[in-house]
Amino acid sequence: MTTSIILDCDPGHDDMMAILLAAAHPNIDLLGITTVSGNGSLDKVTYNAQRICALAGLTIPIGKGANDPLAGKASAAPTIHGASALDGAPLPEPTYDLSELNAVELIAKLVAESPVPVTLVPTGPMTNIAQFLMAHPELHSKIEHIAFMGGSVTRGNWTPYAEFNIWADPEAADVVLRSGIRTTMVGLNVSHMALATPEVLDRLLALDTDLARTVVDLLKFFAHTYDTVFGMPDPPLHDPIPVAAVIDPAVMTTALLPVSIELNGDLTRGATVVDVHGITGRDANVHVALDLDVDYFWNLIVDSIRDLG
Ligand code: BDR
Ligand code: CA
């Protein structure tokens, strides 16, 4: 079964892999890519989205989105993704222009024109998604599902309790989780199972294509920074996981749980408060990823790079 999706991202190494997986897999119709400041400035991540499409020969509309979160100012993650937000290999220049529509306008147009309900896959701060939901209540019924990478059942990576995407715009995540739309959260508790080990890189290199070699060079940069910053020589490939879950939900196990976003705590702002034991009495509002079929996930990734040639 094919699912129509819009990928809202901040490329970023793992966002790149999410784009490539979504573009390659026959179960996905990738209607559009929208960008949000996160791993780098809005200009950098938008340029990266264009360069990724050029690299893989894709012609998917790209809408440039939010520069700043709903509250406050943008912050980037150069320690992880490098100065360009996608360091590690030379990439081709864009082959086509950005959409004339900004991210919110492009999402609204694609959703309104789609003959079937659309799934949104945010893999960066959820500013564009929240702005779309607030601006277009008439289109909520056409959103089938929001499957995002962000948060954690356990601890954070950007602060002790907050994961980067949620920390970067907690108010936007709060809007999404309160929307009433079916939502799936892929947090660090699962994304840290998807480690790009040397064996994975060898499988990619064995494809013997220019695309695979470029992807491996980029992932080696990602591995180096993860090792330096977190002591993790095999970096976690967070962002393709919600795409994989849309391709086939069997790639991970989930539980419907109450999840709230901490908006105020001096030490915990941006934390995803997941009520695993049902002790708050709050309504269960999010399908939370709890486990990953790691072999299946990597087969999907390797196959996607093979199929894009
Ligand atoms: C998330 O933050 C970004 O650095 C990655 O692209 C991923 O979306 C992981 O915390
Ligand atoms: Ca990301």
Image (tube, helix red, strand yellow):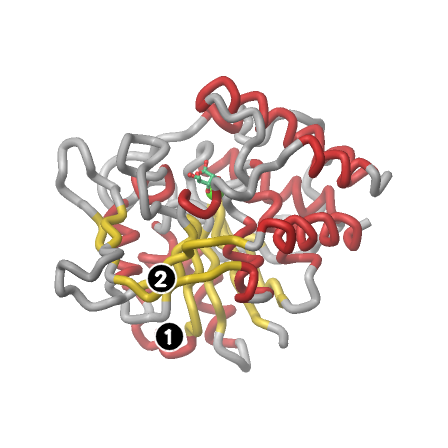
Dot 2, how many residues are within 10 Å of its Cα: few (below 14), some (14-19), or many (20+)? Answer: some
State the quadrant of the N terminus: bottom right
Q: Which residue is mark 2?
A: 132
Q: Secondary structure at mark 2?
A: helix
- The residue closer to the viewer here, 305 or 172, is 305
Q: Residue at x 41, y 58 (%)?
A: 104
Q: Which mark is residue 192?
A: none
Amino acid on which disc 1 is placed: Leu
Q: Residue at x 22, y 42 (%)?
A: 71
Compare marks 1 and 2 and give the one earlier in the sequence.
2
Q: Which residue is mark 1?
A: 139
Q: Position of residue 284 (x, y in %)?
A: 25, 67
Choose top left, top right, bottom left or bottom right for residue 133. bottom left
Asked if 136 appears above or below 209 in the picture, the reply is: below
Q: Residue at x 48, y 45 (%)?
A: 191
Asked if 44 appears above or below 66 in the picture, the reply is: above
Q: Are marks 1 and 2 in contact (CB under 8 Å)?
A: yes
Asked whether residue 56 appears in the rendered view, the answer is: yes
Choose top left, top right, bottom left or bottom right for residue 275. bottom left
Q: Position of residue 168 (x, y in %)?
A: 32, 39
- The residue closer to the viewer here, 179 or 147, is 147
Amino acid on which disc 2 is placed: Phe
Q: Secondary structure at mark 1?
A: helix
Asked whether residue 96 appears in the rendered view, the answer is: no
Q: Residue at x 46, y 54 (%)?
A: 291
Q: Quick one: which residue is furthest to the bottom in this view?
A: 115
Asked if 224 appears above or below 181 in the picture, the reply is: above
Dot 1, how many residues are within 10 Å of its Cα: few (below 14), some (14-19), or many (20+)? Answer: some
